[in-house]
Image (cartoon, rainbow, N blue to C red):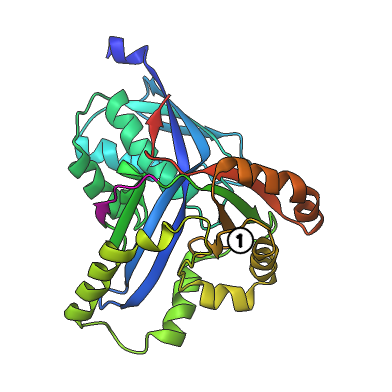
Amino acid sequence: MQDLAKTKINIKSPAKINLHLEVIGKREDGFHELAMIMQNIDLSDYLEFEINNEGLIKLESDCNDLSLSDDNLIVKSANLLREKSNIDYGANIFLRKNIPIGAGLAGGSSNSAATLIGLNKLWDLNLDQETLCSLASTLGSDIPFFINGGIQLCFGRGEILEKLDSNIEYGVILLKNPNVSVSTAETYRKYSNRFCNQYLNDREMIENIRKNLRENGLNNLNFDNQHLFIKNDLQLVVENENDSVKQALYLLSKLENCLTFSMSGSGPTCFALFKDIETARKELTENAKLFKDKGYDSWVCTFLKKGITFI
């Protein structure tokens, strides 16, 4: 404990975008059967972990809009790890927040996975990736993806993961109105009411959709300098009800060198892809005032080959 007490660990906790989000149907367990491609981007939060001597989980942040109590995913993740590992250690955790909240970028899920990874090292637990993924799946559907990160196929409710081998290096522009957030649960409920009128039980159809995404998913994103198409079924619901999303997609569609544009996750963040980071930076520079005047925060990012990293 004496050696551990001197340890301080810092972690980079990146956001994600969806390069494919297909809702196959509603399952009898209440979740939705999904087929997705998720990709980490270098818009990141930062977490600092330090042992405390009180056996308590103490969370602080530079973000005033977050609860720091037991309902925060970081605290939930830390408490779950303590319980499963049957240890007496506590931790002081500080979160520096850059990923917008309620944005469809899974910042909370990323922070949860970063907490499992960070405290696994801080507390010297030596849990393997499979165990961390199993714990992550009990905390939320997006969280297992972040244990390994990068670019992955995500099936089931998001917990069935298959690593993709990709060298895609697109530049990304993100747009989000800071005054608008979207409830993921509510968006799925609305999608279900419109498109999922019965429970899903066709295993052959599920396997065919998975097989098609395995074989063609990356091919759809690899045409040099041509316009691409990204499928996001939840956009069918959100775009029609949310003027912020509708306008963001329109603004991105008009950018001269845009290869494709889409909403990420359940929104309201929207993104456009460009052939490289330099092109994306140029477009953002030329359009930053327009985006701000229309009420949007904007970022330029690249794809990451890895997810959560120690720094």
Query: Bounds of the magenta span?
Result: 161-167
Q: Residue 299: percent from the left, percent from the top? A: 63, 45
Residue 180 visible in image = yes
Quadrant position of the C terminus in the picture: top left
Can you say whether 1 is above or below 268 in the image? above
Furthest residue toward bottom: 197
Q: Residue 308: percent from the left, percent from the top? A: 39, 37
Q: Residue 171: percent from the left, percent from the top? A: 55, 46
Q: Which residue is mark 1?
A: 181
Residue 71 visible in image = no
Q: Residue 216: percent from the left, percent from the top? A: 31, 65
Q: Residue at x 25, y 78 (%)?
A: 28
Q: Is 157 contained in the magenta span?
A: no
Quadrant position of the N terminus in the picture: top left
Give 188 or 55, whichever is nearer the viewer. 188
Give 223 or 67, whichever is nearer the viewer. 223
Give 174 or 100, whichever is nearer the viewer. 174
Q: Is 165 contained in the magenta span?
A: yes
Lateral position of residue 94 relative to residue 76, left or right: right
Question: Which of the 4 image quadrants contains residue 124?
Answer: top left
* Crowd tier of the residue under label 1, counting other residues whose Cα lies within 10 Å: few below 14, some 14–19, many 20 or above: some
Q: Say what secondary structure mark 1 lies in.
A: loop
Q: Residue at x 57, y 62 (%)?
A: 261
Q: Amino acid at mark 1?
A: Ser
Q: Residue at x 30, y 50 (%)?
A: 144
Question: Which of the 4 image quadrants contains residue 208?
Answer: bottom left
Give 66 or 108, whichever is nearer the viewer. 108
